[in-house]
Amino acid sequence: MPHTLAQKILQAHTDEEIREAGQIVNCQLSGVLANDITGPLAIKSFRAMGATKVFDKDRVFLVMDHFTPQKDIDSANQVLVSRNFAKEMGITHYYEGGNCGVEHALLPELGLVGPGDVVIGADSHTCTYGGLGAFATGLGSTDVAAGMAMGSLWFKVPPTILVKIEGKMPKWVRGKDLILRLIGEIGVDGALYKSLEFTGSTLAELDVEARLSISNMAIEAGGKCGLFPSDDVTLAYCAEHGRPDAPRIAPDEGATYERVVHMDVSSMEPQVACPHLPENTKPVSEVKDLSINQVVIGSCTNGRISDMRDAAAVLKGRKVAKGVRCIVLPATPAVWRQAMHEGLFEVFSDAGCIVGPPTCGPCLGGHMGILGDGERCIATTNRNFRGRMGSLEAEVYLSSPCVAAASAVAGVIAGPDQL
């Protein structure tokens, strides 16, 4: 049968013939990921099942990114459990401190994930790697423990929604805007346990960093994964990041899709997701005069170098509004260094921003940007549930770095064209 991208990738990792969506198949894993919050839970389950070694010390990834640097005794002890386990198991890819970045930006940058891979992670945004053409999905820590021990796992083959994106993107529209608009159209459960497969003429305008941003938020639509084909853009990125032999991957002609969603982006505005769900999306011009207390630019969604450049382009020669905290968190040490070399930190500093280390930090309400009662934040992160970034009485709005930076200057939610 003709295969969708999800079916094609899973088929390459199983001996069973994939015939239809909903089928259960056992697949060999390319990589298994956990972080400083989920890792200790997975390690506890790993030991409880009697496992004594990981299936491959080079394909288990432990990234201590959620509290970097650790903020208190509890978070330090979380890292201690993972550090000791990594040492005991001889795990090659253990990242902490100065070599640690936000996991879903770090692994693609290091070439640890790529086209055709099947990757599981004890973090819901593992679906990010679909931007490179990998079947990547977040699972619970117990399932990840089984993956660490056995190197294989059962999957239900997801049905696929084909998303056709057409048209030339306007000046300030980015990948983040495309995924926010899609979630606004289909809802936070619109792709529940389904694969989102992206196609259309607009793909030629989307570099890998934009694709990673889009795939990152497939889970915000309920998706099992968000997949882009592996094309010339993908292969060029992979060659630059240690994967010169990455394969091309495309769906088969005649593949069966559950649904087709059409998006024309040629006249769209930058988007903003309003509280308290990512589906509450509006064009930025409709979210007017809302004063803000905080701006966060970073995270696994938008902490890459292109995001830093977008924010700096808006902030250059301008000042953050009085009473607004603008926090900039490059997602990896490499992004941090590149931003420094390009003079972006000077732009941020001159504007009055706070530049911090690579960390998830405020995205999950961890640290380095917690909101108090009644405060309002616009962030380039991926979730705006009540209490996500601190107080249950706070509000989080989601946007691209372009809109976040413009809002920092305006003191109210605003697009770059409104400055």
Image (cartoon, rainbow, N blue to C red):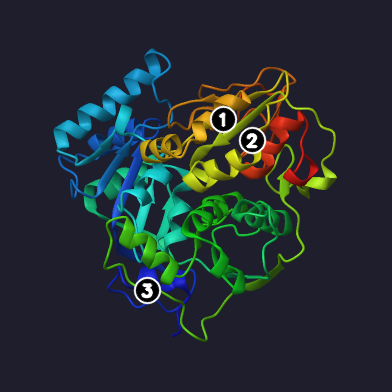
Q: Name the spot of residue 242 as percent of width and height, x first.
A: 27, 56
Kind of element beneath mark 2 = helix
Query: Image height check: is 156 above or below 110?
Result: below
Which residue is rendered at x = 53% and y = 51% of the image? 213
Which residue is rendered at x = 76% and y = 32% of the image? 410
> Dividing the picture into quarters, in which one does residue 272 lie?
top right
What residue did someone put label 2 on?
A: 315
Kind of element beneath mark 3 = loop
Q: Whole-Å distance between the Cαs marked 3 and 1?
A: 39 Å
What residue did someone put label 3 on?
A: 248
What residue did someone put label 1 on?
A: 348
Q: Name the spot of residue 38 as percent of width and height, x first.
A: 39, 35
> Dividing the picture into quarters, in which one does residue 160 lie?
bottom right
Viewed as shown, does residue 143 lie left or right of 345?
Answer: left
Nearest the viewer among 112 and 233 is 233
Which residue is rendered at x = 37% and y = 40% of the image? 334
Query: Image height check: is 352 above or below 34?
Result: above
Amino acid residing under circle 3 = Arg
